[in-house]
Every structure is written in C-alpha cells, then in structure tokens.
Image: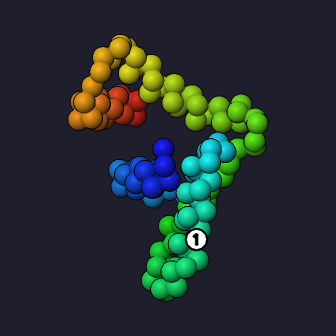
Amino acid sequence: MSTNCFLLALRRFLSRRGNCKVIYSDNTRTFKATQRELVYFTNILKDSKFQNFVADNGIHWKFIVERAPWWGGFYERLVKTVKEPLRKILGKALLTFEELSTILSEVEVIVNN
C-alpha cells in the first residue's frame, strides 16, 4: 500500500470511528512514512486554528519494538476476530469492491456487538 493510499484509508477510518489519540502499529515502512508526513504537515502549517485543532485532536503514533511481533498481539487478535467470520462467510469467493465493503460492514457490526 502506498503512503497516499494509507492516508486515505486512515481518513476513512477516522471519519467512521472519530478521532483517536494514539495509534499503535508495527514498523512497516508505510506507517513510518505516514507518520513522517503527518509531522511534516503539522510543522509546515502555521495557521493558529489548524495548530489548535492538531493540539486538541492530534494523533500520537507508537510503534512496537522492532523484531518483536508478539508486542502487537492485542491488535493481531482483533485482526483474527475479523478474519474468522470472513472465512466462514466468504470461503474462496471473489467479490467486487461493493460486495466486500458490504460484507465488511456487516462483520464490523457483529464484532462490535
């Protein structure tokens, strides 16, 4: 996934779930590049309204220890919680984007309940 695609996905996530204060992730290059870009834009934009918004709603990015995947066990378990229903529902089916979005929304409701 490119950095631009990830930023769009992050925007969709924040639009659906609301802003978050901390994001935990592994040490993928895409995540690190995204963090650098967010810091870069925060430093460049000097508008006081923007700085107040970032200060109030800013995201702090925390990476797990490199070469220690067990540190990410809590979010890996969440991934497994979504993958299991998807495997049961889909099997080996090939879906369009709209079909996959619909199924993921339904799995989201199941997991959150």
Front one among 4 and 39:
4
Task: Indicate the position of residue 41 as horizontal and vertical percent values.
Answer: 53, 72
Give the side of residue 9 with respect to residue 109, left or right: right
Front-lying residue, 108 or 40:
40
| SS assignment at label 1 | helix
Residue 92 screen position, x and y as percent: 35, 14
Pick the residue in front: 110 or 88: 88
The answer to whether residue 16 shows anywhere in this view is yes
Q: Quadrant of residue 37?
A: bottom right
Q: Which residue is mark 1?
A: 40
Identify the residue at image location x=58%, y=35%: 75
The three-letter amino acid code for the residue at tag 1 is Tyr
> Which quadrant is the C terminus positioned in?
top left
In-image side of 101 versus 29 (left or right): left
Q: Residue at x 27, y 25 (%)?
A: 95
What percent of the width, then of the height, locates residue 28?
62, 44
